Image (spheres, rainbow, N blue to C red):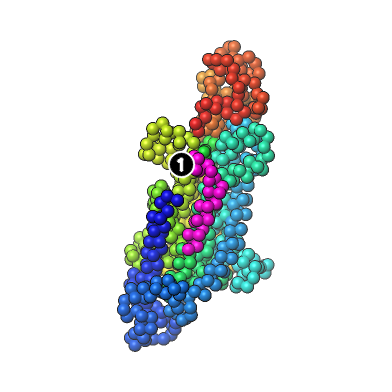
Amino acid sequence: MRGGAPVLLWRAALVAALLCGVGLLPWLSRTDPALTVLKARSAERAPTPEVLDAIRAQLGLDAGPLKPLGDWFGGLLHGDAGRSWISGAEVTPSVLQALGVSLLLMGGSLAVAVLTAGAVCARTLRLGAGRRTPRSLMGRRLDGRRSAGTGSALLSTLPDFLTASVLAAVVGVQLGWLPALGWYGPQWMVLPALSLGLPAGALLGRMLDDLLPGAFAEQWALAAAARGVQGRSIARQALRRCVPGLLPNFGLFVVGLTGGAVAVEQVFDIPGLGRLTLQAAVAQDLPVLQAGTLALVLLAAVAGGAAGLTARLLIGPALRDGALLSLHRPTPPRPTPLPLLYGGLLLAVVALGLARDPLRLDTTARLQPPSWAHLFGTDGLGRDVLARVGHGALNTLALALAVSATALVLGVLLGLLPRVSGPLVDTVNAVPPVLAALLVTGVAGSGPSTPALAVTAVAWAPLAAHTSALLQQERATTHLTATRALGAGPLQLLRHELLPAVLPPVIRHALLRLPGVALALAALGFLGLGAQPPSPEWGLLLSENQPYAERAPWAVLAPAAALALLGAVAVTGGGGGRWPWSRRVRRRGAGGIETVAGPGEQATERQAAGDPVGARTGEVALLNPADEALPALPAGPAGAPGRPGSPGAAPSLTAPRSPTAPAAPTASGPPRPVDPVDPDPARKRDA
């Protein structure tokens, strides 16, 4: 492959830099590794100078940070990852054992994620597979449908540690259906797999559901439907068309579910790799931390390579020959009142909370249920939960929006350079969140901007992977080849062709991750890097009230519901909003063309008299891009469009055409055959 050697060298340099950064972590964070190791070995032992000197001599720290790092790399070349600074045991067996546990948990989580993603996009697949209507009505059915994003957004915003705690307390302890602690067999894997797989599957399913309408609107799908091909076959091919654009993010989920499942492994007491690296990072057990990070980096490289190979197996010939079509949606998402309703509800909660004192303590009213005095109840210190949710909204939303916007810009810019960003994405995604926070703190220091820098350092990777995957497919489209042949330069192609096709789905992806960014900022509070008590930040509210989830669930459900509303607003707002009581405007234009649009919607046109179905039912025919080049509608005897089947009448835009349809008259020549898919193939959008 062209450029393979430079990419391989770039990947090796990134891995070496990451391992060196991990090896220098104690010195970057300006802490004494001997003191940290002593506390991890025996917290009761006094840190006298003699004891610390003995530990430094034992670990070889007297010669500075480079000697231990060089010794570790030298042993690694011979297959020896060293010994733990805490227990003295060999590192390789413990890391391999923890990796096996994490891979098994990851496999179960991916199975749950795939099933969840299928449930999220099932309605779109059913509409696309069961259609027997022409493409104009099909555009309305697919893009006029109720979005699956609301339910998936609520599911994807659930924090994994909160989901794990609820499942462990309710299903494992109260109901006793499944074991809640330990790792002794397949039954112990069910609850952790649900905790990790449900949010991941909701996110992947929403991204897939966003691409499917474009696949069903392509010419091959329309032709197959017109020729009576089974709907299941069309749906399978539509999945084959859309899945390659999501495979890079699927590979990122593989690594994230392996090394990033720290909270779930802690809750369920699972001896996985994420928990092992967390303990090593806190205790500064560098050999274990370096070996665990190296295992995750190798796993990321394997997952990325497998994702690329699978994409080439699915659509490789079309990528090579430049024969793809652009995955544009048939029509823009139709504005709905949902974002206004969700946003209004969120603003009402914030406004009610701002009128109360978030720091007022009342020990006599601890863990009180919701009442008129405390609408959301009280927490473990008797503080009003509604007041804390309202006052924490400003910091949470402002910081999360700033980080998401920065990650979006970085992701798009780096995604436009796939050879540079590909290895970088794999390396960054392999770093556990705790380790990433510690590395950023060591380089930038501890301060108010540290949480934002730490989250931004890893939040851009999924967006860059998504951008690169969509860009690869868009560069292989037929219309881009034609535009390039007409003399368009790289900048013109980027501005007018590539970015308009790539940016909308990536922006919706970034909006879907907005609540996750807010939670990631809060998770740093456990390390002393994020918000600290008594701050009312939403993520901190979740972590503070998590121990009371069984006794006072309202204290946890209130900030979780606020995050869910934030996710619902972000996802449903992708197509704009309109007031529920607004009416659609009907305007009669020239040639009998009726324009139908609601406030904020793009107008769509159809012939009023030539669409008897729409006239009866009041349906709006939304035209896909291939319909935009339809020939002019000929006028009837009186200058108005005639009835279908009458002399001079225009072919109906909504009635299904058969392969033996009569010829369509043109304004300047004899009748020509009508294609069953596109009435004007010479003017197709994708020339």
Tell me what residue is drawn at x 63 percent, y 18 percent.
Answer: 643
- In terms of depth relative to the viewer, which is nearer, 43 or 208? 208
Identify the residue at horizontal 37%, vertical 64% (top origin).
17
Prevailing secondary structure class for the magenta stretch in the rendered image: helix
Q: Residue furthest bottom?
A: 50
Q: Nearer the viewer, residue 214 or 200?
A: 214
Q: Quadrant of residue 12?
A: bottom left
In the displayed structure image, the side of residue 535 where residue 256 appears, left or right: right
- Rendered position, 435 above or below 60: above
* Image position of 100 with respect to 317: above or below: below
Tell me if I can see residue 395 in this picture. Answer: no
Magenta stretch: residue 581 in it? Answer: no
Residue at the image position 56 percent from the left and 71 percent from the top:
270
Check disc 1 and give the amino acid type: Arg
For the residue labelled by badge 1, is the local secondary structure a helix, a strand or a loop?
A: loop
Q: Identify the residue at image location x=66%, y=33%.
A: 227
Tell me: 358 left or right of 242.
left
* Percent position of residue 15, x then y: 41, 63
Range of magenta residues: 298-322
Residue 305 included in the magenta stretch of the image: yes
Residue 279: x percent and y percent?
Answer: 47, 73
Q: How many marks?
A: 1
Residue on which the image places disc 1: 475
Q: Is residue 31 left or right of residue 140?
A: left
Task: Residue 615: give x, y in percent of width and height.
Answer: 63, 26
Q: Quadrant of residue 198?
A: bottom right
Q: Nearer the viewer, residue 31 or 548?
A: 31
Asked whether residue 420 is in view, the answer is yes
375, 216: nearer the viewer: 216
> Where is residue 382 drawn, in percent x and y?
50, 67
